Each structure stands twice: as structure tokens, then as C-alpha cells.
Amino acid sequence: MSNRPSITAAERTPDQTNDEVAAKARKTLIPLLFIYMLGTLCLQAFNLVFQQVGADVGAAGQASLITAVPGVVLGIVCFVYGSLCDFSSLKRMTMFGLVLLWAGSLLGFVLHGSLLEIIVFRAIQTAGFQAAGSVYLVIVARYLHAGRKLLYFGMFTAAYQLATAIGVVSGGVVSAIDWSYLFLIPMASILVVPTLLANLPHTTGKAAHVDVPGFIIFALAVLQLTLFFSDLHWPLLVGSIVTFAVFAVYIGRARDPFITPAFFHNTRWWKAVALMFLFYFTNFSITPLYNAMGASIYGMTSAQVSLVLLPALIIATVSGTSSGAIVGRLGRRTTITLGASLMCLGTLSAAFSVLAGPVALAICIALFYGGMAMLYSPTVDTVLGTLPAEQSGRGVGMNDLAMQGAGSIGIAIFGTPIATNSLSGGNMATNLIGATGAAANYTNLLLIYAAIMVFAIIWFRVNSRSIYAEGTTESEK
């Protein structure tokens, strides 16, 4: 038996205390990921069956709001939660999110007789589960060493892809019984509460003022901008511009704003976060595009299309999980270029395969999703690497906002031509593969998607030297 006196909490050095906090925080990563997966699974399940849900409550014409409104909420809370992680207790934030998640789940299961009730409770669920996702990313950025960060960023995108795959299948299965049971899926998060309570950091390590007015102004500006791209109602764009201008004046004059003008003067960060915007611009619209192709060209149901997409999402799960190892062998710059090239190849090959059959299209979408999952980890690490550690939460929030905002803008732009075949009249698709009508429309859209990815790759290669200019070793690049 040792005779050494035990060290009291008061006698611990700051380094010892920080190491203990970091060790406990790492124990929460898998439970947090579990909650995020449950929320994403529920989100994707409802995305698959929202038309059936709308028809059942007598609001088929407005059924898309079941997806659109929670999407707007998700974009806002991604930023707010991520930013609050720099100022607030991670434990309190996570538990607050869980309470929202459980409330939305139970109330949605009991009260779902109208479209408004479904939208409100789905929005509450979405706001709830994203807290776990934001806290997960901040813990990875703040408490893990460089080599481990890439692994856990990869696990995050792999979990998203896996939850999407399960959600697509479960949405079809559960809706055949009663779609209201989908609301209850996130209640399984109760299982991980004891681990979270025991290990989540309770403070950020510093006392800080929470800038409530700043958050409200910025969230209002983002809300108006997102709704504009969802509905193209021009007064919303004007209102968003005015609100952003008010926000700029506010952070320039406020005594202790949550984000300062200096944050936006970081050109390395601007260039890096633009990558997220470009890479994920087509994220929300690629699945509806494939669904439309399956229905219009091959007479497939949404359930059948989901089975075509399933192998691609499983491949994306493997790609995301392996992305850390790939970066370790190839470096961030090469891995990002490879992932973006696979996305480009997937859309370009799909453009030439519109009439080749569902199997050919399944292979093409696998390239796209596999590339997207591969580049997530090194791109997030690149974005956060342009910021100091004390701004990691705001970096995560802005990064998530760029991803969600890009997807929302993309679906707003491409949603109409997907639904109306408004790009079917050009000669490009006809000259390439002999496609006409709806097939020509989809071919032209896929060629546009490929062109966007070519631009993203060029942007990255041109700006990568300045993005990695400071504090990055050659092996890390």
C-alpha cells in the first residue's frame, strides 16, 4: 500500500485539471454521436415520407414544409449552439437539447392531427438533437490531439451517412404501419444520459458574458435569408440585408459581442469555409434529383429509389470512417482534392448514364456520396485550423451554418427545374446521349452539378497555399 498522500482538488495543477476534464470529455463522444444519429435518422425518415404525412392530415400541397421548416431551424441552431459552446456549459447545453428532443418526440407522437402540429414538433426535435452534434464537434476540436481529430470528424460524417441509410429504410417500413411512431425514435437517447451527466464538462474554463442580443440579431438575419431561398420572397432578402447591416453595426459598437469584426477579417477562414459552401451546395438536391429520375424515367416508387441509394450511403459510411486514415497517408490537401474529384466524377458519369438504368445510376451516386464523406473530415479540420482554440465553437457553428445554408440555397435553385423539367429544351444533353424531355433535363442538371465541383476543385487548389500558410506542417497539408 502506497504511503504517498493523495492530491486534493485544491492542490492539482491547472494542467492536471485540464487533462482530467479532457479525459472525461472524450468518454462522451460516442454517446453524443448516438444522440445525433437518432435525430438524423428521424429527420431522414420524415424526409422520405413527408408527402404521405401531408396527405394523411389533409395538407398535401404544403407537405414540403415538414422538411423545409426544420431545415431552417437546423441551420440556425447549428450556428447558435456552436457559438454558445465557447461561452456556456457543455453539460447544460446538451441536457437542454435532450429536453427539447424528448418534448418534441412525445408531443409529436400524441399530437399530430394537423400539419402545424407536425411542423412545430419536428422543429423542436431538430433543435434538440443538434445540440449533441455541436457539442461533439467542439469536444473533438478542443480536447483531442491533431491525429485523433481527423478520426472523430470522420466518424461524425460516417454516423450521418449511416443514420441517413437507416432512416431512409425505416421511414418506408414504419410508415407502412403508422408514421407517427417515427416521432418516438429519438427517445432511445435516454440510455446515454448517465454517461453524459458523469463526464461532460460543466464549464468552458472561463467566465463569460453571453451576448443574447447579438445571437438574436444574427439568427434573425440568417432566418430571413434561408426563408428567402426557400420561397424567393424578395422582401425577405431585403430584410436579411438590413438585419445583417444592423448586426455589423452592433458588433462594431457592443462592449462584449459574441463575435467581433476581427473574426470576419480572417481571410484564411473565409477561403476555407467557402469550400464547405461549394462542396455541399448540391447536397440537399441530389437525392430529390435521383428520386425524380427514378419516377419519371423508370417508373420507380420512392421506396424503390431508396433501395438504389442504400448501397451508396453504406459506401459513404465506410468512406467517412476511413477518412482519417486516408488523410494520414495522403495528407489533407490530396484527400480533399480526391473527395471532390469523386463527387465530380459521380455527377458527370451520372449525366452520361441517365438512360443506362438504375444500376448504373446507383454506381454513380456511390461515387458522389463516397467522395463527399471522404472530404468532410479534412475540410472541417482545415476550417477550424484557421482559427485559434478559443474560437473553436464559433468556428464549428459557422462551418455548420455554411453547410446547411449551401444545401438550402441549392435545393431552392435546383428544386424548380427538378420538378418542372425546365432545363429539358437545350441541345447539350441531346447531343451528348440523345436524351430528350425529362431525361434531357436531368442530364443538364447533372452537368451543372459537375461544373460546380470543377469550380470547387479549382478554388481549393488556387487558395490552398494561403489557407495552409500558417501553423501547418507539410505532412499535415
Image (tube, rainbow, N blue to C red):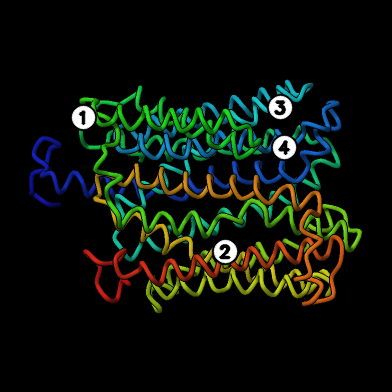
Mark nearer the N terminus (2 vs 3): 3
Dot 1 falls on a residue whose secondary structure is loop
Mark nearer the N terminus (1 vs 2): 1
Disc 4 from disc 3: Cα separation:
11 Å
| Amino acid on which the number 2 mark rests in the picture | Ile
Q: Which residue is mark 2?
A: 452
Q: Which residue is mark 1?
A: 207
Q: Residue at x 77, y 38 (%)?
A: 50
- Above or below 461: residue 266: above
Mark 1 against mark 2, which lies toward the viewer? 2
Please provide percent x and percent y for residue 45: 71, 44
| Amino acid on which the number 3 mark rests in the picture | Ile
Mark 4 against mark 3, which lies toward the viewer? 3
Mark 2 against mark 3, which lies toward the viewer? 2
Q: Which residue is mark 4?
A: 182
| Amino acid on which the number 1 mark rests in the picture | Ala
Q: Which residue is mark 3?
A: 118
Dot 3 falls on a residue whose secondary structure is helix
Mark nearer the N terminus (4 vs 3): 3
Mark 4 against mark 2, which lies toward the viewer? 2
Disc 1 from disc 4: Cα separation:
40 Å
The one nearer the camera, 50 or 204, is: 50
The one nearer the camera, 412 or 392, is: 412
